[in-house]
Amino acid sequence: MRLTSALFAISSAACLARASPQPNKSFFYAGHDLSSLKILEDGGATYKDTAKDNATRQVEDILGDGGMNTVRLRLWVNPTVPYDGPPGYYETYDLDYVTTVAKRFHKKGYKIYLDYHFSDYWVRKNARGGQIF
């Protein structure tokens, strides 16, 4: 009788454990700002997956295996403003560039967090000739 009761209790607990709702991991956004990814890859960057014997893989596959489900992309409204950095830097964050990168991640099932940068040059010190705040 005790054995039957013990087996019943164990099997009931196992059934309840399977029936209980599991947390929905996709409820949370786990992401990275990968706005510069294409720029880096165009410059020759490659990515090694240390979890898979240093195999060269696409960064979205490596990060996705680690739980990433969202990508943040910066879109500058006027990316051609002059500035004192490397030539062509701002032009890469225009609508065409961001659309290309967004499509790449969308095909893999990632959520896209589009971050609009309405101005990226006036916040630099002395760019407007006065205090910002």
Image: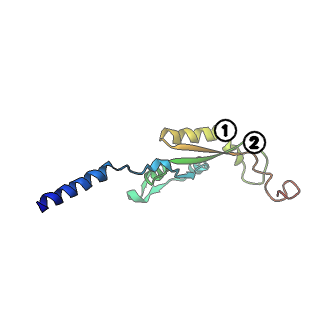
Camera-nearest residue between 59 and 132: 132
Is 95 positioned to the left or the right of 54 in the image?
Answer: right
For label 2, the residue is 78
User: Label 2 neighbourhood size at 10 Å, few (<14), some (14-19), many (20+)?
Assistant: some
Is 57 positioned to the left or the right of 40 in the image?
Answer: left
Q: Is residue 132 visible?
A: yes
Q: Residue at x 86, y 53 (%)?
A: 128
Camera-nearest residue between 73 and 91: 73
Q: Secondary structure at mark 2?
A: loop
Q: Quadrant of the C terminus?
A: bottom right
On residue 95, the disc is: 1
Placement of 20 over or under 6, stated as above or below: above
Placement of 128 over or under 98, stated as above or below: below
User: Label 1 neighbourhood size at 10 Å, few (<14), some (14-19), many (20+)?
Assistant: some
* Residue 2 in which image quadrant: bottom left
Residue type at tag 1: Leu
